Image: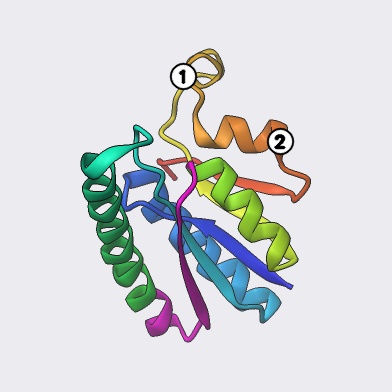
Amino acid sequence: MSIVLGYDESPGAVRALHVAIEVSAAFGEPLVMVYGAAAPGALGEEYTAHRDAVQEVGRTALGHAVAVADEAGVRTTVEVIDQKPAEALIEAATRHAARFIVVGSWGESPLRGALLGSTPHKLLHLSRTPVLCVPTEP
């Protein structure tokens, strides 16, 4: 089994990283860090350039997170997946037989999350894997 973390360097994701590290260490399981890198649009040279840029941002963000996990002695795997964040996390959780998916929240109201389609909101409704949603503020 593993713990899957959605990470994008937002304030909620940074706090979720620390919780995911604690959970991974407690269970003695690897931490799979995922960045959903679906670029908007679907065709053309601009799409390819945009996709490549989004993936590079994801790799950089995950690199920072790996350094934090390494300091804590937690084994990690990194995945930049060309899907929207919720879809990427669900796919990774299935492939890695995840115990939990850990994500941060921005502190949005439930109504705002439902209307705007926040990643935590989507995961809570679509994931068969339990979701640990970490609030931004302790």
Secondary structure type for disc 2: helix
Instruction: Name the residue tied to disc 2.
Output: 126
Q: Quadrant of the C terminus?
A: top left
Picture residue at 22% right of the left edge, 44% below the top:
45
Q: Quadrant of the N terminus?
A: bottom right
Q: Residue furthest front?
A: 44
Give the x, y percent position of residue 75.
Answer: 53, 83
Judge from the rendering whether residue 110 lies leftward or rightward of residue 28; answer left or right. Answer: left
Picture residue at 59% right of the left edge, 61% below the top:
4
Q: Is residue 112 above or below residue 19?
A: above
- Between 70 and 85, the one lying in front of the other is 85
Instruction: Name the residue tied to disc 1.
Output: 116
Judge from the rendering whether residue 75 lies leftward or rightward of residue 127; answer left or right. Answer: left
Q: Amino acid at mark 1?
A: Leu
Secondary structure type for disc 1: helix
Q: Amino acid at mark 2?
A: Leu
Q: Which residues are magenta?
A: 69-84
Determine crowd level at label 1: few under 14, some 14-19, many 20+ residues with C-alpha closer than 10 A. Answer: few
Whether the magenta-drawn stretch holds residue 82 is answered as yes
